[in-house]
Amino acid sequence: MLWNKEERYTHLPYENEAELESAVNEVKSQLFGSKRIYLDDKKKIGKRGKTNNLPDGYLIDLTNQKDPKVFVVENDLTSHQHLKHIAVQILEFSLSFEASKVKVKNVIKEMLQKRQVEWRKCELFAKENGFENVDYLLESIIHKPDSFNALLIIDELGEELETVLISRFRFPVETVTLKRFKSDKGDILYDFEPFLNDLSEDTEKVNITDIDTIVVPAREDGFNEVFIGEDCWYAIRLNSSMIPMIKYIAAYQVAPISAITHIAEVKSIDQYKDTNKYILTFTDPAEKVKKVSIGKIKGKAPQSPRYSSKERILKAKSLDEVF
């Protein structure tokens, strides 16, 4: 329940996937932001006689000027689907995508051509970032290696499902939870975290194309025993689509030190045991750097993993310049 002195909102479950899809369309501008384009036309992909699928939509992500992406979208209800079904559906999407990249590009292009505002947004992005036109932009996104990305939008994400998505696939699978509430007056309220919200917070100052470092908060005992003693850091939550960008890890030692003090090159990023978290193993022992302490903005102290760049950290005089 959500409550204040004026109103009470109670959870309103979706009766079917169509209601969830309608909700996604209603909140898409806030859910995805201005640099992403959500296309919800249902078009079959795959080759005749092989795996064919009907994705619920596509999300064109133009936040990274050097590496724009396309996410194949699946909308699902946990109450209606078994974990195995969701995992199989995403796997089949990846097989159909890889088998019919020309068709995928044409399907997305046709969707964009029906939407003048979205088409113009892609035209501007292409012009500003060295792509000849929208056709070439889509060609570059879809035909590059490891181009498949999945986005699961669901009403409730359990730890078991999140763990399955990490352990079963070698391609990125991002997740968004979208819940619905209704007031006694009949007003609707949606509860969600914007797509890649933690990344958006860090890119207010740091261009996403420059990100190569994850900054993690560390208490003294964990820092000494693990970061320094074991040359790794584990039980970290990460956005799977960001993993290829992470080349370094920086340790922010919490109070009383309250500063970034060490950086290590990342050798590998793997699932941590049988959980929905990751372990980062270092190439070499972490190197001590000039302390980057809290500046005037106290809220910049990381409470959870944050994204930045090694260059920015080494140049920074305070955390205000890191995030």
Image (cartoon, rainbow, N blue to C red):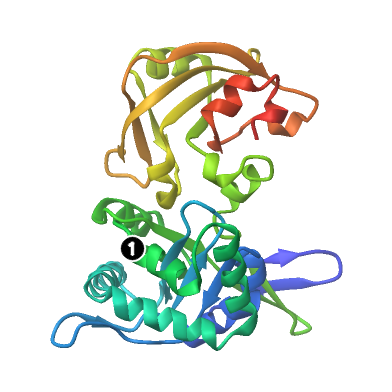
Q: Is residue 110 above or below residue 226?
A: below
Secondary structure category for the residue under label 1: loop
Q: Is residue 65 above or below residue 179?
A: above
Residue 11: tell me if it is visible. no
Task: State the residue at coordinates (19%, 80%).
Answer: 51
Q: Is residue 58 above or below residue 239?
A: below
Residue 28 x, y percent position in the rendering: 61, 73
Residue 254 x, y percent position in the rendering: 60, 20
* Residue 301 sits in quarter: top right
Residue 165 x, y percent position in the rendering: 32, 57
Q: Is residue 287 above or below residue 83?
A: above
Q: Which residue has dot 1 on it?
A: 148
Q: Nearer the viewer, residue 160 or 254?
A: 254
Looking at the image, residue 127 sits to the left or right of residue 87; the answer is right
Residue 225 x, y percent position in the rendering: 39, 14
Query: Is disc 1 surrounded by few (<14), some (14 to 19) or many (20+) residues within 10 Å?
Result: many
Image quarter hosting the N terminus: bottom right
Question: Label 1 amino acid?
Answer: Phe
Looking at the image, residue 76 sits to the left or right of residue 200; the answer is left
Looking at the image, residue 271 sits to the left or right of residue 23; the answer is left
Looking at the image, residue 54 sits to the left or right of residue 317; the answer is left
Task: State the residue at coordinates (47%, 69%).
Answer: 153
Task: State the residue at coordinates (31%, 81%).
Answer: 103
